[in-house]
Image (cartoon, rainbow, N blue to C red):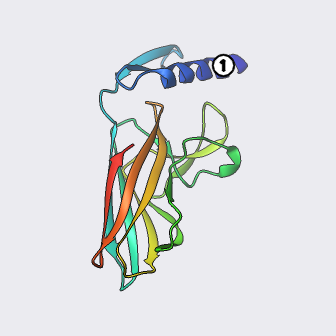
Amino acid sequence: MKNLTLIGLLLMSISCSLNKNEVIVETHKNDINGISYVNMRNFQEDPYEIDFDVNQINKDEYSMLITMNLDEGVYYFSPNTNPKYGYSGVFKITLEPNPNLLMQDSLIETPKSYEYRDSIYGGPANFVKENTTYEQKFKVLTENDFDVKGLVQFTIEPKCTYEEIVFVLSNKSGKLSVKHSKK
């Protein structure tokens, strides 16, 4: 078991150190005879799309929607993963400190991810393996114009790259909008 764990960690570290335009190596177990084989997958582009939107709920309450559209076989750690296991690269959203917005409720994931046993570290983890939307509600505390920077962070697997998407919530003349770009 220790040898399998060491081999898994070695393969993961090799794949994580590759340039994003290089070939990623994945190992799989053949169901017929139990022999491991290597699957080469070339990630020339990001294996996901991310979209942002802002909807007004009432006069000063809004919800920001972040939609993650995944290519086949791609996944990441859900924000619902138990933090006690210390996984890095879990999907998270942060806003810079500001007096203009007040976050309400916790992040809502739809559809909700399921808990799986992580084959590398052995602990339970929630993996997102399908297109998913996140909703974060907040209240606007001023009528003045403002810009608030935020960041979406996650590790996309099996590409094994740490992704950072910068977004800006802007209030201009009472109209709230969101724009984003890859860091």
Picture quadrant where residue 177 is located? bottom left
Observer-nearest residue: 130 or 57? Answer: 57
* Residue at point 43%, 58% (across, down): 149
Q: Position of residue 83 (x, y in %)?
A: 66, 51
Give the percent coordinates (x, y) of residue 148. Answer: 42, 63
Comparing 43 with 142, the one in front is 142
Res 136 → quadrant: bottom left
Query: Which residue is nearer to you in this view: 160 or 132?
Result: 160
103 vs 40: above or below: below
Residue at 52% across, 13% down = 35
Q: Is residue 134 above or below residue 175?
A: above
Q: Quadrant of the C terminus?
A: top left
Q: Image quadrant for the N terminus? A: top right
Q: Please give the name of the residue rendered at 37% of the width and 59% of the height, measured from the top-left corner.
A: 168
SS at mark 1?
A: helix
Please say if 173 is above or below 36.
Answer: below
- Residue 166 x, y percent position in the rendering: 40, 50
Q: Disc 1 marks which residue?
A: 6
Tell me where residue 17 appears, x and y as whole percent.
50, 22
Structural crowding at the residue carrying mark 1, measured as other residues with C-alpha within 10 Å and reported as few (<14), some (14–19) or many (≥20): few
Question: Which residue is located at x 50 percent, y 25 percent?
Answer: 16
Identified by mark 1, the residue type is: Leu
Taking 57 as reference, is 153 above or below it?
above
* In this rendering, position of residue 75 left or right of residue 175: right
